[in-house]
Image (cartoon, rainbow, N blue to C red):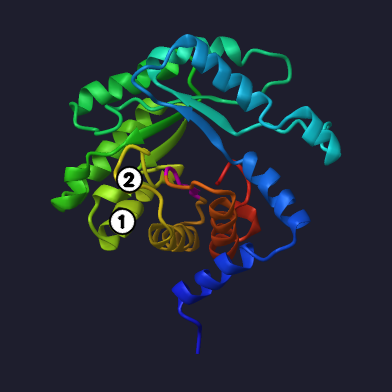
Amino acid sequence: MNQPAFLRHAEQIQACRTVKKESQAAWLLKAITFISLTTLSDDDTSSNVQRLYYGAQYPIREALLKSLNMCDKGLMTTAVYVYPTQLCVGTKALKAPGCTIPVASMPTGFPAGQTHLKTRSEEIRLAVKNGVTEIDVVINRTLVLSGQREALCDEIRQFRKACGEAHHKTILATGELRSLTHVFKASMIAMMAGSEFIKTSTGKETVNATFPVAIVMLPAIRDFFWKTGNKVGFKPAGGILSAKDSLACLSLVKEELGDEWLMPELF
């Protein structure tokens, strides 16, 4: 008999806690390359945004990298997210030679997604015009909770069209969807509407990324791939507070989707 998924994942999480320190260090360095550094505070200034961009380019102290023989690896985070009003600071900060970190932002009435659809679509177009190459959109959660599937699909399709060539990620705000059934349905609708990534949370909800939610979203991604051949990325956001949590996330993705998903383009 197959082992229940929740028991299998519990064992994986425990295994993450007992692996050798050397292996942990290697996996944690790998995890850094998946991280999107983010500042979405009401008191953001150009100076703290600049510091964040510097941290994205140099996330580990040079002395530590030397001790690990990693100085020549060009270790960077995968992206930096700021409010649209700070995009000019970001585009200037990331023009350093050899820097390939994308400029990313969260328009569409972040974090509630309650402004008019036309306004949110225009915010996306303006962000892309200002140099953003990754866009995280937030859905109107009411559409999920009230069963308006076609309206949700149409909303996400309009967002996808407004993104143009920019990478498109859909934030489901799973902590506000009230049930795992809603999480699964929202995941499938987002993927069918053309989302290149599905993301758990804005980080502003009371409950953000959790393992039960991941155990729903990852099989949805796998099933969608089996049925369509299209690979959709997964982004857990908010609530991952420790190194052990990040190792557990890596383990879940590896188990459910395989090694080919363990790259910044898909995780």
- Closer to the camera in the image, 135 or 54: 54
Q: Which residue is mark 1?
A: 183
* Residue 150 lies in the magenta stretch: no
Q: Which residue is mark 2?
A: 172
| Kind of residue at disc 2 | Leu
For image coordinates 25% across by 48% down, the residue present is 176
Does 206 appear above or below 23? Answer: above
- Closer to the camera in the image, 157 or 136: 136
- Closer to the camera in the image, 229 or 232: 232
Residue 224 picture location, percent across and down: 44, 59
Which numbered tag is attached to residue 68?
none
The quarter of the displayed image where residue 15 is located: bottom right
Q: Which residues are magenta?
A: 232-238
Callout 1 crowding tier (Cα within 10 Å): few <14, some 14–19, many ≥20: many
Q: Relative to 129, is 140 on the left or the right?
A: left
* Residue 234 lies in the magenta stretch: yes
Callout 2 crowding tier (Cα within 10 Å): few <14, some 14–19, many ≥20: many
Q: Relative to 137, is 244 on the left or the right?
A: right
For image coordinates 48% across by 20% down, the residue present is 132
For image coordinates 39% across by 49% down, the residue present is 191
| Kind of residue at disc 1 | Val
Does 220 appear above or below 142? Answer: below
Task: Find out whether the residues at labels 1 and 2 contact each other: C-beta distance under 8 Å.
Answer: yes
Identify the secondary structure beneath mark 2: loop
Identify the secondary structure beneath mark 1: helix
For image coordinates 58% across by 68% down, the residue present is 14
